[in-house]
Image (tube, rainbow, N blue to C red):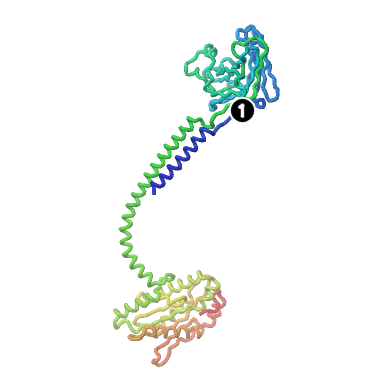
Amino acid sequence: MHARVLRRLLIVLLALTGIALLWNEFGMTTTMVIDVHSPYQVVALDDRDNPGGRSTASTSHAGSVLGLDCDLRTGYEWPFCELQVEFAKAPRGIDLSRYDSLRLWVTASGPEPQQRVRVYMRNFDAAYSKPGVAESQKVNQLTYEPSVYPRGYEVPLSRLTVAQWWIDEHPMTLDLEAPDFRNVTGIAFSTGPRVEPGLHTIHVERIELTGKLISTSTFRLGVIVAWMVSVIVWLVVDGLLKRNQLRLSAASQHSLQRLNESLRLETRSLAEIARTDPLTGALNRKGLADELMRIVRLGEGQTFPMTLVFIDIDHFKRVNDTLGHDTGDQVIRGLAQLVRSAVQRDDLFARWGGEEFLLVFRDTPGDKGRVIAERLRERIATATWPEGLHVTCSFGVAEWHRGEDLNEGIKRADEAMYRAKQEGRDRVEIELEDDSPGSLRSPPPRDSAGSLRAAERSPAGHEHG
């Protein structure tokens, strides 16, 4: 299981890694565009602030082009004109270090046969720059001839170098002499070296800086870290799972021992379940038959006569029809608890079916059984029941003698119970053997008609058995 999951995870990780690397290589780009619509300030600079400088420069806008018009004159030792796009005022700037290439759409004209342009990207860093001193900003420069690249010139930023004249004027440690694009204040286009006096123009149509949203080195490092984290997570999870398996294996061994013991007990429990009614816990028909057979085999002369008492709940169908089967189940459970609490432990009590129950009293003649049944009838009629019900029962009593078929005794008790129903319910009737002098019947209970009328006024007062 774990090996299959591991293989699937490895395949998924390899696929994701390949897709991510391809995306980083051929996509995942970000571009910064600078043109006439950009919100940056454009200014023209010339050499007039320097000793002997007489050149003049001005900006021009022709459609979508930023322009520099320069009248270059001799006077200053290194005459120049410059078109500068200011990103921000020092010491603030823009971090361009995430970009790796620069693309320029520039044209230039002048008296030289090969018109060259110098591109400056000035960077402010407190380690070597001073606020208010423009010359202290590091000059990253590139010199090229625009006419050679009429469709635009693309160059890696790494090709830009720090101007040697700036290094000569600002001596510093070697680690600070490298190009720096972390806080660029502006980009400028200047007339080239060894320029001739005369009219010069520089037109900038578009500047693009392109780079990765995440640098290739950083992204690959992230992929490596992701793989390492995945491996560590897998090792931790696998270790926890194996530890859990060992724990479960030990627990399983213990459980198997307990299960073997439980199975022995379960066999006995299943036998008990097969003999009892799940709703009331009383014996079912099979359980009652088994107990009677056991008693008959072991009881000898102290067993007979037995008294069989049928108990049937009056108007029980009304309870189910009006209050639902849940209430009916509560009534049946309550009756079973009441009967068990009122008889001896040796007496047998079984649920015969539905709302019918059967009591068996050992070594008890019928007239004594009738007295016990009458006490039970009174307790049931005066007990408290769910939903305020008034519950009564009809009882049929019969004797069962040694050598007699049990079915005959049960039949007589059943007939007595149905006679109690016919005589008005909530009463006890006794049925003796056919060859006895006669049937003994209990007198009608006091106010039995009133009890019936009260049952009819309660929710259970619908016609039923």
Q: Give, as a three-letter code, the residue at label 1.
A: Val
Whether residue 376 is situated above or below residue 230 in the rendered picture: below
- Quadrant hosting residue 462: bottom right
Which one is in front, 155 or 236?
A: 155
| Point 50% across, 69% down: residue | 326
- Quadrant hosting residue 43: top right
Image check: 463 left or right of 310?
Answer: right
Which one is in front, 215 or 64?
A: 64
| Point 70% across, 24% down: residue | 63
Whether residue 241 is situated above or below residue 335 in the rendered picture: above
Q: Is residue 55 visible?
A: no
Rendering coords of residue 235 (x, y %): 38, 41
- Quadrant hosting residue 191: top right
Rendering coords of residue 362 (x, y %): 35, 80
Q: Is residue 314 visible?
A: yes
Residue wearing tag 1: 33
Could you classify mark 1 by the number of other residues whose Cα lies within 10 Å: few (under 14), some (14-19), or many (20 or more)?
A: few
